[in-house]
């Protein structure tokens, strides 16, 4: 039996690459679509929470007639969008602050340090008690303990050597 269904190997490699590219493109497209649907949906839902007052301001209220941006600012959907973006930015800033706060723990975990638990405890103390504990956690996490231990050992070793007095 001949197998005419199989492509030569160079076509299979091209097909695999095209399949990966198509899957990647589809994945990015789905993520973008989901983000846009979330943005629009949240904007519409948040627009229901607010009311724009002053929509019936007379044209004489403004020095040069109605500003062109007034229609956009009078839109509840646009204000819902602004509210959503503001909340998203605040959440992102809190996330970044948390990442900064946890930098010592991440460093200790990356270095597989034996001090990871104490650094985590000091970071929590820094969060809830006093920032001095957080600074101590940073110092412990970023210190080169191998170099420090070698130098302390050298100091101790040199201190234990008996002092030889020179003969006169």
Image (cartoon, rainbow, N blue to C red):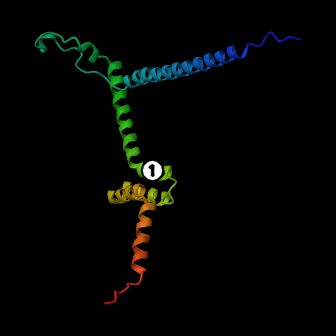
Q: Position of residue 77 (x, y in %)?
A: 36, 19
Q: Secondary structure at mark 1?
A: helix
Q: Position of residue 118 (x, y in %)?
A: 46, 61
Q: Of all residues shown, which one is farthest toward the right?
A: 1
Q: Name the quadrant containing residue 53.
A: top left
Is 107 located above or below residue 156 in the figure? above
| Residue 66 image-quadrant placement | top left
Say which quadrant the N terminus sits in.
Answer: top right
Pick the residue in front: 5 or 34.
Answer: 5
Residue 136: x and y in percent read 36, 60
Residues 149 and 132: in front is 149
Residue displayed at 42% across by 58% down: 144
Residue at horizontal 42 percent and vertical 80 percent from the top: 160
Q: Is any part of residue 124 visible from this angle?
A: no
Pointer 1 residue? 107
Q: Is residue 21 left or right of residue 5?
A: left
Q: Is residue 131 above or below residue 93?
A: below
The extreme front residue here reads: 168
């Amino acid at each position: 039996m001949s197998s005419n269904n199989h492509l030569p190997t160079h076509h299979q490699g091209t097909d695999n690459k095209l399949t990966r590219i198509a899957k990647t493109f589809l994945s990015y497209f789905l993520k973008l679509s989901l983000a846009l649907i979330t943005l629009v949906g949240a904007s519409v839902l948040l627009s229901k929470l607010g009311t724009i007052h002053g929509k019936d301001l007379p044209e004489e209220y403004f020095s040069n007639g109605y500003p062109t941006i007034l229609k956009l600012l009078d839109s509840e959907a646009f204000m819902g969008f602004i509210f959503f973006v503001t909340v998203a930015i605040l959440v992102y800033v809190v996330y970044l602050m948390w990442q900064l706060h946890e930098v010592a723990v991440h460093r200790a975990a990356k270095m597989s340090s034996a001090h990871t638990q104490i650094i985590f405890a000091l970071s929590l103390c820094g969060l809830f008690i006093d920032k001095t504990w957080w600074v101590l956690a940073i110092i412990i996490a970023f210190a080169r303990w191998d170099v420090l231990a070698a130098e302390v050992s050298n100091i101790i070793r040199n201190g234990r050597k008996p002092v030889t007095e020179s003969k006169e």
